Amino acid sequence: MRLFSKKDFTNTKWYILEKIFQLVVGIYITPKIFNSLGAYNSGELEISKAIVGVLAPFFFLGLSAICIRELVFKPKMKHYIVGTTLVLRFCSFLLLSLCLLGYTYFTNTSEITSIVLIIAFSYLFRISDVIEYYFVAFKQYKYVFICKIITLILVLGVQYYGVERHFGAFYFAGVLIFEFAMQTFIYFGIITYFKELNLAKLSWSLKLAKNLMVSAFPLLLTNFVIVFYLAIDDFFINTYLGNEANGVFSVVNFLVIFITWNIGAAFIYGLYPALAECYLVDKNLYVKRLKFMLKVVVFFGIAIGLFYTFFGNYIVSTQYDKSFETAKTPLMVFAWAPLFVFVGMLFEKHLVNQNKLIRNVYRFILGCAVNALLCFLLIPKYHLVGAAFALLLSHFVTNIVFVFLYKSYRQDMWLLLLNKAK
């Protein structure tokens, strides 16, 4: 019996192709945006994204993996699952938008506050991600690929126009609204034209909503801790070193997370439906698939670390102006983080299938605490290099060390490494 079907790999191919296209476009346009804005304004835009990012888990409600899992496990309930998830996501957007508007009304509005509101509004259109969950669950990621590529081309044109006109942070924050609005219209056009999902049959179920929220609550907490965890560096850098340093470190994040990290994540997410579908029916096949995926992501993580170790300085020197020179050493340090993160991503998918997501909450709380402590100790003395080491070591603790702290976690890693089912 083949480990994965042709359809599994085809689905994953579309995932990875999308990330490669994003990589090519990102390499072309993102340095131009950073150079156009300069380190200070880039930092202003990035800190605004970080502020909204802290609220992102409450927009998404931790429903992505749960919705995909339920669609895989219960395909006949697809209209109830998609419909209920859409309503939940829309309600979360309304509630959080009112909170942000209320906060703005009773405080002095600064430039960063205005940018935050613009970015937050883009989440109205990100509700269409629920349609993406449907395509992922039923291994039809080619439709997501079509949508993302068309959107990418349109956004590239808008971004290039902004660079040529030397527009500021407000414009590039507004591009996010344009991007997700286009994505929403294209998604609904695809499902209407190809009749993949009947919008008229989408239904709300209070019982299902409760079940989804109960299952997703640990992921919501986890995602909140994760975004806070990732934002810690931005806030510490902004406090100790200022907006310009934040802009420089955003280049490091872009090169590691957006370009390479996303490709490894695409591989895991692309094969996840195949992983989920055999969990209940064939544990031996499930373990073999986990082991195969682990080998691939570990190899890719090592390749990323080596690539930036040898070519990171050249990339920063040739693609960015002199205000970003200090990104070179932090890049070589943080480049090894994907090796640990990919293992953690795969472990999380295993926990989703086991419905033991509370473990995720604990490990990210530990990682968050370690990151904050290391940022406090290292950034004032070692500046951006200290920030990179703080983030790298906290990822190691979160994704590797934590698994070995207790017997039950060690058993899960044993399952991943040595092909032994529980």
Image: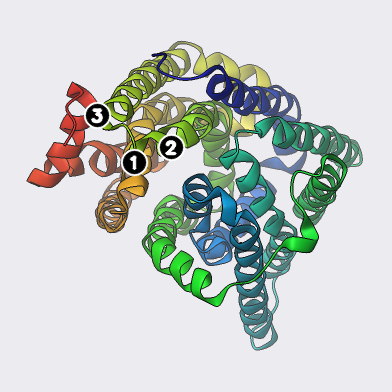
Measured Cα–Cα span from mark 1 to mark 2: 7 Å
- Answer whether labels 1 and 2 touch (C-beta < 8 Å): yes
- Decide if residue 326 is in sight here: no
SS at mark 3 in the image: helix
Dot in front, 3 or 1: 1
Q: What residue type is labelled 2?
A: Glu
Where residue 58 appears, as percent x and y from the top left, is 53, 67
Q: What residue is shown at x 88% (from left), y 35% (from top)?
A: 157
Looking at this view, is 4 or 390 the one in front? 4
- Decide if residue 206 is in sight here: yes
Dot in front, 2 or 3: 2
Name the residue beneath numbered marker 3: 416
- Position of the N terminus, as image quadrant, is top left
Looking at this view, is 325 or 58 the one in front? 58
Name the residue beneath numbered marker 2: 277
Q: What residue type is labelled 3?
A: Leu
SS at mark 1 in the image: loop
Where residue 296 appears, as percent x and y from the top left, is 39, 18
